[in-house]
Amino acid sequence: MSQETVGVGVIGIGRMGLLHCRMVAETPGLRLVAGASRAEVLRRQVEERFGVRTYADGHDLLVDPAVDAVVIATVSQTHEAWAIDALGAGKHVVVDKPMALSAAGVERMMAASRQAGRLLTCFQNRRWDPDFLAVQQLLAQGLLGKVFIIESRALGYGAGWPGWGAAGMAHPWRVHREDGGGMLFDWGPHLIDQALRLVASPLQSVYGDLQSRVWSTEVDDHFSCALRFAGGAVVRLEASNDVRLPVPRWLLVGTAGTACSESAGRGAAGCLRIQAGDPGAAETVRPYPAGTEVCLPFYENWYRAMAEGAPLAVPAEETLAVLRVLDMVRASAEGDEVLRA
């Protein structure tokens, strides 16, 4: 791609779609040129805030010659179809998480990407969360020895979760199976992606549990899973909208030390409390700031990948690995059994 700027269109102008519009507009090299939504009120918001044209049908955006690349921020169930259509139209594509609702869906999207000769990536913004980066740095330093237990949680409680979306246009898709709702598909892609970044050993087995307790009878509002890796490391992941009290975001147990996070909730500022050596040894405290859904480093990399041929920060192959684990968690929960990877 030779032009100095890359024209970007966003399909799906809900809460996340508006956030993607903002990130594109703030990233050097990217130029927001269009948005698409069936809702007239949301189209007006984009037109007034960003000064770009909008379409009621995303397919009209795909034939806009000023659009070189597309961000898919629709409901999860439609990610696969929109991405394949956008790739077929010759556009580079970012898909919000989950990229698809199954590994097979991601494989179809990757095939479309190869056929079109266009880039495909997933918006895994939580790779840049301050708490995750602090944990990643701690593990790289080896202060805890051989780490054999990692617990990672995204727990909270809020009546707004089922209808969280664009202001005035909230659609409770998170509590409907047909829309790809549920906590597994909401936070699971983030937690699993982080886990696979932290443990280099091959995955050996998966056990999952899905609970529908408070907000829906169709999908889970509380999920947990245990991932066992070669060498014996176990990663326990949990996400919920049913937990009314704060619980540590991270716990790491190693042969030479332990680390535990303190924070007020998902994405909140906090610190890692670290104790290495014998019990009673002085603790080390490493503060980290609050996280944010705004992730300009992701978009800066996307621009370099399109304009300069730089490697994608989130290649589709890594997202495929995440979806394979998601598939196993769901199958394990349905059969109440441990599945071998």
Image (spheres, rainbow, N blue to C red):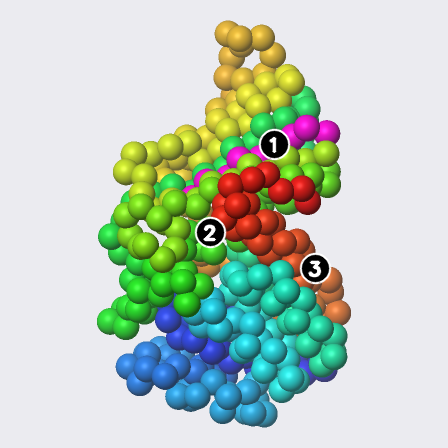
- Mark 3 is on which residue type? Glu
2 vs 3, front mark: 2
Give the SS element for disc 1. Answer: strand
Tell me the residue at 58%/8% (across/down): 278
Residue 103 x, y percent position in the rendering: 62, 61
Tell me the residue at 59%/81% (across/down): 86
First in sequence: mark 3 vs mark 1: 1
Q: State if disc 2 and disc 1 touch (CB < 8 Å).
A: no
Tell me the residue at 31%/85% (across/down): 40
The correct choice, above or below, for 231 with respect to 175 in the image is above
Residue ID for mark 3: 317
Label 1 neighbourhood size at 10 Å, few (<14), some (14-19), many (20+)?
many
- Mark 1 is on which residue type? Val
Residue ID for mark 1: 234
Q: Which of the pair 116/283 is nearer the observer?
A: 116
Residue 94 x, y percent position in the rendering: 57, 70
Residue 261 x, y percent position in the rendering: 46, 30
